[in-house]
Image: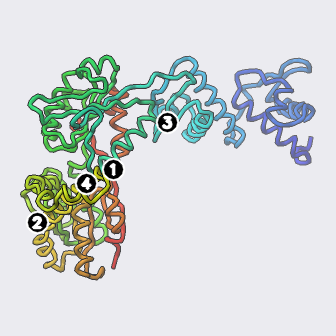
Amino acid sequence: MNLKKSPVLSETVEKIRSIIKLNSDVQLPSVRTLSRQCEASPVTILRAIGVLKKEGLIEGKWGSRHHVTVENITPEPATEFQMVNKVKKTIAMIKHDIIEGKYQTHQPLPSIKQLTTHYNVSYPTMKKALAVLNEQKIIKQSGAKYYFFTNHVKPKTKIAIVAFGLGRNSIKIVSERERNFYRILSTVAMDQNVILDTVCCNDYLEDSQFYTTDNSPLPRYLKNKEIAGIILSSYHMKDSAECLRKLLLLNIPISAWVEDHRIMKMIGSYSRNKRNLSFFDSSYSTLPGFEVGRYLIGKGHKKIAYISPFHESPWSQNRFTGLKNAAVAHPDVRIYSFLCTEYLNDYFYLKTVLDESLFDKHCSIHDIKEMIHPFLRNRIEAVRYEHDILLRDSRIFSACENLIKDASADRSITAWVCANDHIAVLITDYWDFCAIPFSERPALVGFDNSFNSFERNITSYEFNISGEVQQMLHHLLYPTSSYMLNDKPAIRVSGRIVERASCYSQ
């Protein structure tokens, strides 16, 4: 039979040959089944079987099933049809293992590399199989991981957020990074089927007080609410380290968000010995400064200034250390420091304003109240806040002014790294006030990628808050995972440089 004159028959023969390759240990399907699989008429299927019988690949008589002659099979390059069938076969095997309970609900599947080894298929085949299962909503992808889900609703895991607050449901949130943290945490928790409960802690009292949602003592609350883990935010606490010590007594997995220098001292001594505790440290590490330094050196800058009025703080010191570390491999690069070491952060500048009660001295609350309608009087506090913030920024700039003048005196310095976006914004506004041409300004980089840096086109280092949140929840949901059972004192997730006009070539 001349197959060249019958392309449909030739294609059908190859399709049946592919089916034989995948099912060499069983009988061929019926003619009707082969007709559906090959999308050909029963007559064409019978003609194709006749061709393969002449080749000795199959044997059988009319009215009985045809059997594959195994010894006559020779390997051939995989066809697209074979690939499709391998994917289908892989999907069937994974579904079978899911039904048999091999994979636990809502827990991550093994890595793709492990799955390819287990099912003896290629990486592309496994990727396609997982993609189909994802489309069928049998599994769900989250980052690089895949999870098996069922139609049965799994009870939501409950996690408590412990953060500074003066009372129940009154977490103190000031910075833009804090707002982003809680916003992203809420979103990721919803995706991971997690309920978040808030526990405020006021450790400025003589005896620290935990404010639970039902006003019960913390140990009873954690037990009654079936809390699976705790996220500790060290922002604003008087002594976050002492708070962490109290929480560790409860023997519940903890993800500690390091945003307070006091808690840093615990990292080395605690995390190696307590596997249910993981520290997540980005802003206090040397990594951000190192990555900013590497970025500027890569752009050709040889002399770089670091400017900070907060250099009493470990986070400022570590950013400067990271910057210097980036220059170690480049003998021709020089890092210059312009520092004020009196205060830890902007709050300590604000405290000097608050201690002097300057708003009350400058403004008459009684006169203001007389001038406005009663329902608007609650906004007076907002006016007080803006007044105090304005004076705070003035005092911060006063501390920076000599630093800026000293750095500007050396025209060979082509890039300035500021301790954070707050300082970068003040410097940019000052340059604008002085009408300094863009061509005469050095490259400028801050940290935080705040909205103010976006408004003023300032290049800024963006902390990977989303990555930190993902890892925090992963530790609490799967505290015995191999990733967490390591000897690292803290988990540091790399961020990125968001480049804007302040670092473009002039």
Mark 4 and mark 2 lie on one chain; the one further toward the N terminus is 4
Left or right side of 355 for 96: right
Left or right side of 485 for 8: right
> Is residue 311 among what the camera can see?
no
Farthest residue to the front: give it.
370
Mark 4 and mark 3 lie on one chain; the one further toward the N terminus is 3
Q: CA distance from mark 4 to mark 2?
A: 29 Å
Residue 471, image x, y percentages: 35, 38
- Indicate which label's residue lies in the foreground, 1 or 2: 1
Q: CA distance from mark 4 to mark 3?
A: 59 Å
The amino acid type found where label 4 is placed reads Ile
Considering depth in this image, is 235 or 393 the residue closer to the camera? 393
Residue identified by numbered label 1 = 375
Q: Quadrant of residue 272?
A: top left
Residue identified by numbered label 3 = 112
Q: Are marks 2 and 3 in contact (CB under 8 Å)?
A: no
Label 4: few (<14), some (14–19) or many (≥20) C-alpha neighbours in 10 Å: some
Residue identified by numbered label 4 = 380
Q: CA distance from mark 2 to mark 3?
A: 55 Å
Mark 2 and mark 3 lie on one chain; the one further toward the N terminus is 3
Secondary structure under the numbered disc 3 in the rendered image: helix
Q: CA distance from mark 3 to mark 1?
A: 61 Å
Secondary structure under the numbered disc 1 in the rendered image: helix
Considering depth in this image, is 33 or 466 the residue closer to the camera? 466
The amino acid type found where label 3 is placed reads Ile
The residue shown at (60%, 21%) is: 96
In the image, residue 274 above or below residue 387: above
Secondary structure under the numbered disc 2 in the rendered image: helix
The circle on residue 399 is 2
The residue shown at (74%, 30%) is: 20
Q: Are marks 4 and 3 in contact (CB under 8 Å)?
A: no
Q: Are marks 4 and 2 in contact (CB under 8 Å)?
A: no
